[in-house]
Image (cartoon, grey):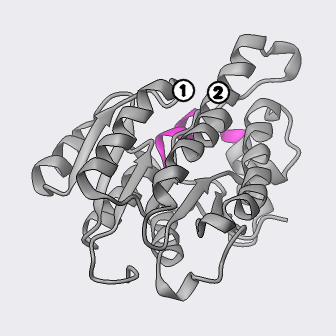
Amino acid sequence: MPHSKIQRVCLITGVSSGIGLAIAKSLITKSYIVYGISRTPSAETELLSQQYPAFSHHSIDVSKTDQLQPLLRYIWTTHKSLNLLVHSAGIPHGGLLALTKPEDFSYIFQVNYFAPIFLSQHASRYMSKSRLPQIIFISSSSAFRFDPGTLAYASSKAAINYATKQLSFEFSPLSIRVNCIAPGVTDTPMLRQMSPRAIECQLNSSASSSICQPSHISSIVEFLDSESSVHINGQILRIDGGLP
């Protein structure tokens, strides 16, 4: 359950599908006010907007941080609160370094690392004045593994893992908790972009050998934003079925 019956205000990136959409669906049914960001709306976000007045979708490219600040100001002006920020937006990439263009490497880091970092920077100014605020990053089990062709993507997620630890200390004086969820192979549109060999390799390496569902991740977000987790800070929760 949320911290109290007072509606908590949440901002989620990458909300059009996959993990971000699952988190939005979960929180909106728990009486959160949810602002969702993705480059374009989806049929699912359109339906959520129709069913739940407390959900709204905003077409923003997270890599363009100047587009995010007006929305943050609007949220604060409207609610005087921003309690939870979930960074779910991300792009995959596969390829050996020799075959990766510098501009592709830079864009992966722009979306997967710099965008959530600078959004957290701007949002922290509002979150510090809100009740029991928390930032949750979505990382990846790839950040802990050494698989051919994952350098760009896994490095961007490893950087997020480090940022989780660092920001938990930097934001502690502001009473903002910072945690991270690192899923393994998860049933999302991104899964369809992975090679069958890479999927098989990860599943064979895990203790459970099963594919994670987005609802498994959304339930962890619910837990992290509950009274039971108030002493969890700076942690990277691996939800990967038991990968070494």
User: As shown in the figure, which amino acid type bears the numbered disc 1?
Assistant: Ser
Kindly tell me whether residue 149 is visible in this rendering.
yes
Label 1 CA crowd tier, 10 Å (few <14, some 14–19, many 20+) = many
User: As shown in the figure, which amino acid type bears the numbered disc 2?
Assistant: Gln
Which residue has dot 2 on it?
Answer: 110
- Left/right of residue 58 with respect to residue 63 in the rendered view: left
Instruction: State the image coordinates of residue 132 (x, y, percent, origin top left).
Output: 48, 73
Q: Earlier in the sequence, mark 2 or mark 1?
A: 1
* In magenta stretch: residue 196: yes
Instruction: State the image coordinates of residue 214 (x, y, percent, origin top left).
Output: 47, 59
Instruction: State the image coordinates of residue 163 (x, y, percent, origin top left).
Output: 75, 51
Q: Quadrant of the C terminus?
A: bottom right
Label 2 CA crowd tier, 10 Å (few <14, some 14–19, many 20+) = some
**Mark 2 → mark 1, Cα distance in angstroms:** 6 Å
On screen, residue 41 above or below 27:
above
* In magenta stretch: residue 185: no
The answer to whether the residue labelled 2 contacts the one labelled 1, judged by CB atoms less than 8 Å apart, is yes
Residue at x 38%, y 58% (from the top left corner): 10
Kindly tell me whether residue 187 is visible in this rendering.
no
On screen, residue 208 above or below 228:
above
Instruction: State the image coordinates of residue 109 (x, y, percent, origin top left).
Output: 70, 29
Which residue has dot 1 on it?
Answer: 63
Residue at x 85%, y 50% (from the top left corner): 145
On screen, residue 237 above or below 135:
below
Span highlighted in magenta in the image: 187-197
